[in-house]
Amino acid sequence: MIEQYLGITGGQLAAAAGQTVYMLFWGLLLGSLFGIPLGILLTITRKGGILQNKAVYALLNYTINIVRSVPYIILLVALMPLTKAIVGTRIGTKAALVSLVFYVTPFLARLIEGSLLEVDKGIIEAAEAMGAAPVQVIRHFLIPEAMGSLILSLTTGMIGLLGSTAMAGAIGGGGVGNLALTYGYQQFNTPLMIATVIVLIVFVQLIQGLGNYLSKRVRTRK
């Protein structure tokens, strides 16, 4: 029945959804490994931060702004030589991950910075007054106090990443976006286009719902 209405098999749709989940998981994981430390550095080196450093903050700030100013589809094409060097190919799901990580890292860094800046400065000052070292302030005070907001920031980052995985279909990156482009748009298959949009909506609802739930749990435990 699915093949009759959409022009593809249920297996193809399930495989595309699985590829999207793959890109979301690894893209968010790798992006977080870089983006979270960058967000922390932006917070602690800015003016008034616990490790204020004008030069470091300026370097990070301008670099992140430059990368974020490049539209994803352009970043996708510009990184193809690097993608080839890293994964050995310019197309496919693994190839798409390289540009996805480059895209989401500065985005997450800004979201993390915003969450950490919400923490009451009085808490940080009290921690420093008790003799806590900068690492201790970050680990035991700054991050725990901002955890609820950090979860929502990662949720927002993941939803933004989802939109980029759809655009990764332009290089055969797989996933729902590639399905929509190859079998939907190029073949004027409107029902399939609508189906892929519905799948993406379901993904967004699940991600946002989980993020809201986890954030609420963290906040109520304080």
Image (cartoon, rainbow, N blue to C red):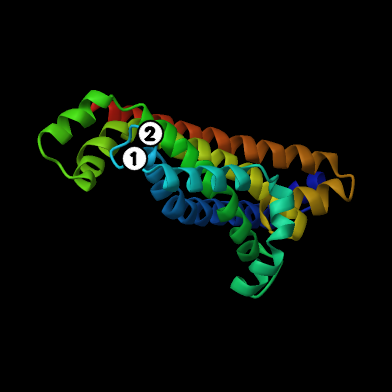
- Disc 1 from disc 2: Cα separation: 6 Å
> Label 2 sits on what residue type?
Lys
At mark 1, the secondary structure is: loop
At mark 2, the secondary structure is: loop
Q: Nearer the viewer, residue 33 or 69?
A: 69
* Image disc number at residue 28: none
* Image disc number at residue 52: 1
Mark 1 touches mark 2? (CB < 8 Å): yes
Q: Residue at x 59, y 72 (%)?
A: 86
- Location of the C terminus by quadrant is top left
* Image disc number at residue 47: 2
Q: Residue at x 42, y 38 (%)?
A: 112
Q: Nearer the viewer, residue 142 or 194?
A: 142
Query: Vertical placement of 111 versus 222: above or below?
Result: below
Percent position of residue 144, x then y: 26, 36
> Label 1 sits on what residue type?
Gln
